[in-house]
Amino acid sequence: MRAERLGSVVYRTTSFTIWRLYQVTRRRHIIANSILVIIGLILSFELIRDSLKNGDFSGYVRAGNLVLEDKNIYADATNTWPPLFSVFSAILALGDKVSGILTRFLWLAGSVLSMYFVVRLTIKMLLDRTLSWRNKGSDIMLQDNLVLVPVLIMLRFLLENLANVQINVYMLLLSCLAMSYFVNKRSILLGFVLALSISLKVYTVFILFYFIYKRESKATIWTIAFLFVLNSIAFFVFGFETAVSYYRHWYVEIASASPTAHHKNQSIFGFMLRFLTSENSGDGLSASILSLKSETVKYITYGSVILASIFPAYLFRKRLADKSNRKAVMEYSFVFSIVPLLSPLAWKAYFIFLWFPYLLTYVYLYRTDNQIERVNMKFLRSLFLCSIVLTTLSAQGIVGWHFSRILETASCVTIGTMVLIFIQLTLYQKMHLFDLNAVEYQTAGISQK
């Protein structure tokens, strides 16, 4: 009798516990779905609103029109892109002639869709799982906190790209495709997409530098080969002499020009100029602690970058035996971190490239089993939150226009990115203490591993 009574109590207790857990996870699922709906509504609103704005897209259209009209593409001072970009922009100019609003809407919708594929590709590289809208066993749902948290962190930069009608999300997608093709040993496709991104915006050249450093001959050769093939299009369109003069002008007058100290330039070069020179950073604000010459600061910056690169260069010195292992993926994430940081001119929208680093560090710090000492883990998590505050919570929509400008003048995004890089290098050295096979993820009603 006592045994039956005890069994009944155990059964009721177990049933109640399971029911409570189900209710909690179900509630979390509802909250996650609600957040996803809110994000969707925000993006839908931005698509409609920003398709009515010109943004940087108007510069793309002007560059394309100069090609169509057979005029000097650099007659427009806002054209700071390589010659091939103007050829590409001719397609956008033709669309603009039909309907500017429709063309911009399609461009922005393509940006949002590209970001979705970026999430899919990076989830696949990091966890070898597929992103899904529905519960399909081992797939990761879009509503999972593992996806939602990094999306919320990066929402500021996605909205920056939409508001200014820019191309950076497409550049991020091409970069992720390049890394995905690299992991899957599809060197020809890798070379094409990486060469295309470099030919259009240049700053993804750091990925090529990474391949060169790692002695990845196939990736390097195919990328360089496609750089010649793709840029030959500009010679075909403009003629040999004109194309040569355009490339010379772009290199001498634009690419070699000194970076700006303006607060919107959050690269390491803008950071150093704001602190070490008395150059105007815009809006009458200043973070200057010295008044050195710009040329002197340029050499100081290059020297600082070289010194700072010695440690990661040493860590990453070995060739990749397995292109899909955890350390390799961490290296890819590190390269994405330095793309906006080391670009001479990096507006805030460029930092959409931090998607992969934030996804990776969030997974390691909050979603994996690990054997790191509690104090060290708290320290890393504190740095992670600090990085988020600096890069994301400094947005104008959160702290207001004036305070946001003050934070940008103080290089908050730059510093936040450097903190994120430090976290990645620390994790890289402690990789053996993490178990990525034990990453927790949510399905429709339960939590699984």
Image (spheres, rainbow, N blue to C red):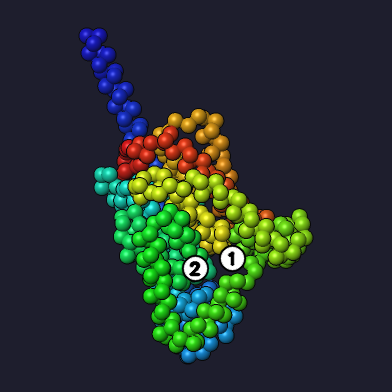
Real-space Cα separation, disc 2 to disc 1, in angstroms: 11 Å
Let me know if residue 355 appears in the view. no
Camera-side mark, 2 or 1: 2
Give amino acid for label 2: Val
User: Quick one: which residue is furthest to the top in this view?
Assistant: 1
Res. 112 image quadrant: bottom left
Q: Percent x, y for residue 76?
A: 57, 83
SS label for mark 1: loop
Relative to 30, say whether 430 is above or below: above
- In the rendered structure, which amino acid carries the disc numbered 1? Leu
For residue 314, say whether it is visible: yes
Q: Determine which residue is flagged by label 2.
A: 202
Q: Residue at x 59, y 64 (%)?
A: 344
Can you identify the residue that label 1 sits on?
345
Crowding around mark 2 (Cα neighbors within 10 Å: few <14, some 14 to 19, many 20+) is some
Q: Quadrant of residue 295?
A: bottom right
In the image, what residue occupies the spot 71% across and 65% down?
294
- Image quadrant of residue 186? bottom left
Q: Please tell me which residue lies in front, 447 or 27.
A: 447
Disc on res. 128 = none
SS at badge 2: loop
Give residue 151's position: percent from left, percent from top. 45, 53
* Residue 13 in picture, x, y percent from top left: 32, 22
Q: Residues within 10 Å of mark 1 (few under 14, many from 20)?
A: many
> Who comes first in sequence, dot 2 or dot 1?
2
Relative vertical location of residue 41 with respect to residue 234 in this rendering, above or below: above
